[in-house]
Amino acid sequence: MRDSIVGKLIQAETKRQKETLDLIPSENIVSKEVLQALGSVFTNKYAEGYPAARYYGGNEYADKLESLCQERALKLFRLSPKKWSVNVQPYSGSPANLAVYLALACPPKSEDGKVPTPKIMGMQLDMGGHLTHGHSVSATGKFWTAVRYGVGKETELLDYNAIRRMAKKEKPKIIIAGFTAYPRLIDFKKFRSIADEVDAYLLVDMSHFAGLVAGSAYPSPFPYADIVTTTTHKSLRGPRGAMIFANRESKIAAKNKIDIAKAIDRAVFPGLQGGPHLNQIAALAVSLKEATEPSFKKYAHQIVKNARTLAVELKKLGWRVISGGTDTHLLLVDVAERGIGGKDASILLEKSGIISNYNTIPYDHRPPMNPSGIRLGTPALTTRGMKENEMKKIVTLINAVLVEKKNVSKEVHALCAKF
């Protein structure tokens, strides 16, 4: 690379990734083929619009690429193109969710402010939800009236009766099921029932567990959802991007006389975005094909096995794991119970080459910038080929850092060198 400064940064980051244990649930390692597509000449092309309806010339291959990506997305999640459409243009997960709200719950124009803003209902950020599920600092919490559900104080699990009561009281236009830090399965059938009772759209944000759904290691939301959004990295192991799946047979959309697929497409472009990132779509198409291979199903199940092993082994050493364990790729650990702040724990671990992130836990009494928990996940380590025995070793290393105050960099480097 002629730009030696950037070249050195890329080399340094490559070395960092090789020599550290990445336990961040939202990160993964893509294949060389995905990187090749991401750095391809599709970077050079502008393609505002959709296949066969572009505003620029020269899009013969762009059309073929985007259509191929859509076909692969539907195939991967075992969806009929007659029933489902998919938009692969969103730049990332946050604008994908914003596009859904714009399409199905657009705030009315009101000069006097007397027209009520439509409500969206999602999981509280500090209990496992996402900023774009209606948090006050997000555009989704500023442009829409947001009501937020949590988890039971004793169980640390979703309380569907409480969610139903909230929905009946608040009458949201959209109910969001999905998480960034909830370690258990979601009962999509119950969410569907709740949404039906209040004539709400059910949006499932499967950004974190999309790869697990693709690999049949997590229940599919598609039999129950009106819309499904997902990022394309995390457990799906693709480039950073997003997709929006729309159920053409949505009963609530039919009742509201909305063509849900067209509404989503218009919200993405021209509603929110300009030209799609074709290089990103090319890389996504490659990763979707990779996810249809038999090895990916084994990979998805191994992710969950590894996360469960982390949870079991941490509990053996006296650590409190939120909700008692995990059914997914992630878990939350209460480090404050052992007298450590979450941020402090994350910094200590990183000094030894163990990369995590600090995270709030349900009913957290500590501030968000140094909360009570750390969040651990297994997609990246599983991609490297690590299994249960390595997870047990990693738990001993985590415990050595946080309890025994040891620096375990040498042990971390030795483990990384094997994978």
Image: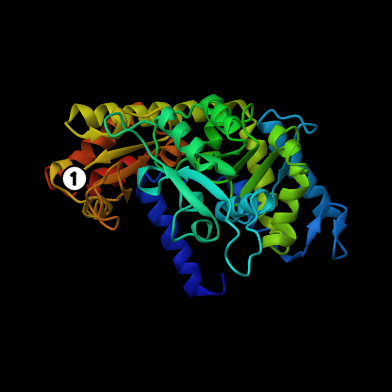
Task: Write down the residue under mark 1.
Answer: 336
Residue 327 or 34: which is nearer the viewer?
A: 327
Q: Give the image location of residue 110, x and y in percent.
A: 63, 65
Give the structural element (helix, strand or loop) at label 1. helix
- The relative height of residue 296 versus residue 284 in the rendered view (above or below) is above
Q: In this view, does 102 lie to the left or right of 159?
A: right
- Which amino acid, mark 1? Ala
Dividing the image into 4 quarters, which one contains the C terminus? top left
Q: Give the image location of residue 137, x and y in percent.
A: 44, 61
The answer to whether residue 288 shows anywhere in this view is: yes
Residue 416 or 113: which is nearer the viewer?
A: 113
Give me the residue at 60% from left, 30% from top. 196
The answer to whether residue 41 shows anywhere in this view is: no
Give me the residue at 67% from left, 61% from top. 272
**For residue 293, what is the image quadrant?**
top right
Dividing the image into 4 quarters, which one contains the N terminus? bottom right
Give me the residue at 78% from left, 48% from top. 262
Q: Is residue 76 left or right of residue 359?
A: right
